[in-house]
Amino acid sequence: MRNDPVRQKIRDLLWERGLNMREASLAIGRNVSYVHGFLERGTPKVLSHRDAEKLAELLGCEAEDLRHAQRPPTRKGRGRKPRRDNAPEGSPVPLTGIPEVEVEASAGPGALAGEFVAEKARWFLPEGMIRYEGGAVPGAIRVLRVRGESMEPELSEGDRLLVDTSRRVPATGEMFVLWDGNGLVVKRVERVSGTGSEPGLRLKSSNAEYADYTAPAGDVHVVGKVLWTVRRV
């Protein structure tokens, strides 16, 4: 991502103000590796309006200076994989296609609405495994890629999650994908007493460097329950 003028401007302004990427991440209310991920790994591809405004305030520039007129190009050799609609032939059991989707950084509560997602690949999995082992309907399953380090060592960057989008009632101790008001996260949840009569959700990370935090239940949009994880080795 070295040829991206927006990212280079952020690097220059951080250097001028004597800030590192960790300090900038915390200053805009993100996790410690957020700015590093954006600048060095291209994740997310573009800043959300909120993040652009907060980062511009920190760096003393206009928010428009930190917004892309168009998406930066993908890295060479990492273009979108062709979609496969048909299951491989010769399988001894019925297979069903599960889309792996990439969600826009600025998607908001409607994170899996059509205009915010792009299908990156299709996973063909045994239909019986999904229905009987997972207790889910295949059409409700989506595959999402793990980003960030907050769930280390339980989950790592690049792992995949099979998420049942029909299960949106958070249960204590279970892992869910949620919109927490700032972005899409995967956390273990715990129901707690909120302010006044409104209940809250405690969102818990596995990585000790990331503090747990509580959000009003009404501000959290549950995308779905994590059924299985696929680890990178």
Image (spheres, helix red, strand yellow):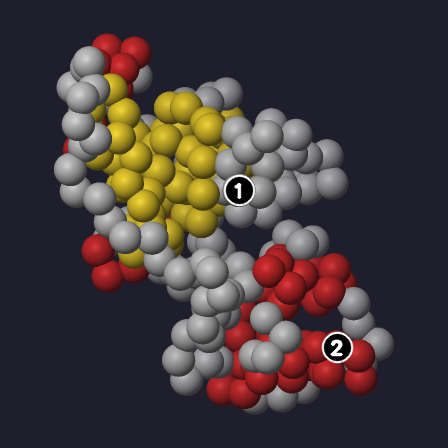
Which residue is denoted by mark 2 in the rendering? 14
Residues 104 and 63: in front is 104
Identity of the residue drawn at 50% across and 70% down: 47
Q: Is residue 33 left or right of residue 127?
A: right
Looking at the rendered image, the disc whose residue lies closer to the viewer, 1 or 2, is 1
For mark 2, give the secondary structure: helix
| Spot occupied by residue 48 in the image (x, y as percentages of width and height) | 46, 68
Q: Which quarter of the picture shows residue 70?
A: bottom left
| Residue, disc 1 | 158
Spatial separation of the CA atoms under disc 1 and disc 2: 28 Å
Mark 1 neighbour class, 10 Å CA radius: few under 14, some 14 to 19, many 20 or more: some
Quadrant into which the N terminus falls: bottom right
Residue at 53% over, 47% down:
147
> Amino acid under label 1?
Gly
Q: Is residue 207 above or below residue 77?
A: above
Mark 1 element type: loop
Q: Residue at x 59, y 47 (%)?
A: 148
x, y (%) of residue 38? Answer: 59, 64
At which x and y percent is residue 162? 37, 31
Q: Is tag 1's residue or tag 2's residue first in the polypeptide sequence?
A: 2
Res. 75 mark: none
Mark yes or no: residue 193 visible. no
User: Which of the pair 74/182 is nearer the observer?
Assistant: 74
